[in-house]
Image: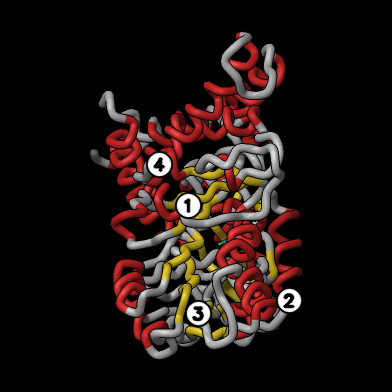
Amino acid sequence: MTAESYDVERIRSHFPALREGAAHFDGPGGSQTPEVVARAVADTLTAAIANRGTVTPAERRADAVVVEARAAVGDLLAVDPRGVVFGRSATELTFHLARTLAKGWGPGDEVVVSRLDHDANVRPWVIAAEAVGATVRWAEFDPATGEFAPEAVESVVSDHTRLVAVTAASNLIGTRPDLPAIAAVAHDHGALLWVDGVHATAHVLTDVPASGADFWVCSPYKFLGPHHGVLAARPELLESLHPDKLLPSSDAVPERFELGTLPYELLAGTTAAIDFLADLAAPQSDSRRDRLAASFAALEEHEDALLVTLEERLRAIPGLTAYSLAKRRTPTLLVTVEGHDPQDLRAGLAERGVNAPAGHFYAWECSHHLGLGATGGLRMGLAPYTNASDIDRLARGLEEICGSSS
Ligand SMILES: Cc1ncc(COP(=O)(O)O)c(C=O)c1O
């Protein structure tokens, strides 16, 4: 599949939000939504719908929505749909599973978390470990290069380690750690690997088994879908875990982990979003997984080409420091500019119709480790709908604000 088949203007025409005219670099916080996703949500809410069941068409519709959404996520992540759990958010699912896993931990056990991660993949583990007297160990990344080496995990893992929690990609600086190498380290010591795939899933084709992850969380609202969370794990692994749940609710996997009634309309939207992603490069195949693979390859090529242009323009801005430096990373840039508060850069860009937020984006440890504290920096994230004109508007805006325009 070649980049010629990636028609960004065709893709943009599906996003009503883009008609407002802003150039959106706020995708890492939540992407814009194609019409077809919104329609799937509305159609599900307005159709006859009941709790899942087999007796009425309304019950069968709810059931089909759930089954289809698990199948779609299965294709997106290359996982068994029977191991796909839906929840309120990645944060909520991580807290839920951290509490569940910690039931089997105690003093002497250890958990490894990283300084690269969003706090959603740090604090749930720290709190769960503290509650049962387990010890937390920290794996560091190199703030000068943005690299997170597998050795960072190796140096803190031991035979007491029960779980390693690490991101598939940093939502602040884009770094994509070598997950298979980290998985090998964790598994050699008998530990499970929990991966926060929230940022990565929007940019690169995910293959959870190939990554070595035992658990993978992601959030459809980062990849053109609605606001809820997803957890994927092998069904056998989920079978071995016993979360807090209501007495009469299903004890089957994955339902055992789903608290309360599922948001059927959002699940329908997620299926539509995954179908939309599979069609990004309009590939022809009966297999949705194959179409996703071709479309993500084209998306990566598209985003990488735009990123090269953007980085070239940014390098010419006096006083600019770039923090997104790792060799393998997503098209998400964090910068600061000497003499300019990141919030002023954000406001200046907003005046020019360019949406690029500033801050730490809950990557609390990461921002502090970079020396940026709670202030953070200006974050610019590319998305499937980003085009060359957006890149030019962003670069020109920064050039004007920072006084380097000719
Ligand atoms: C890398 C990363 N992990 C976790 C989260 C939290 O996701 P959710 O809002 O689904 O809890 C985010 C949200 O920004 C994120 O970027």
Q: Are the two marked residues, 2 and 4, in contact with CB atoms closer than 8 angstroms?
A: no
First of labels 4, 3 by sequence position: 4
Q: Is residue 357 visible?
A: yes
SS of the residue under disc 4: helix
First of labels 1, 2 by sequence position: 1
SS of the residue under disc 1: helix
Identify residue type, mark 3: Val
Whether 299 is drawn above or below 64: the answer is below
- The residue lying toward the viewer, choosing from 111 and 174, is 111
First of labels 3, 1 by sequence position: 3
Label 4 crowd bin: few (<14), some (14–19), many (20+), radius 10 Å? many
Q: Is residue 391 visible?
A: no
Numbered badge on residue 238: 1
Whether 189 is drawn above or below 46: the answer is below
- The residue lying toward the viewer, choosing from 201 and 102, is 102
Label 4 CB sits under 8 Å from any ligand 1 atom: no
Q: Residue 398: percent from the left, percent from the top?
A: 62, 65
Identify residue type, mark 4: Leu
| Residue 339: quadrant of the picture | bottom right
Label 3 crowd bin: few (<14), some (14–19), many (20+), radius 10 Å? many
Whether 47 is drawn above or below 38: the answer is above
Kindly report which numbered mark, 1 or 2, lies closer to the viewer in this rendering: 1
* Residue receiving disc 2: 341
Residue sitting at x 67%, y 23%: 51
* Residue receiving disc 3: 112
SS of the residue under disc 3: strand
First of labels 2, 3 by sequence position: 3
Q: CA distance from mark 3 to mark 1?
A: 21 Å
Q: Is residue 401 left or right of residue 118?
A: right
- The residue lying toward the viewer, choosing from 327 and 187, is 187
* Residue receiving disc 4: 76
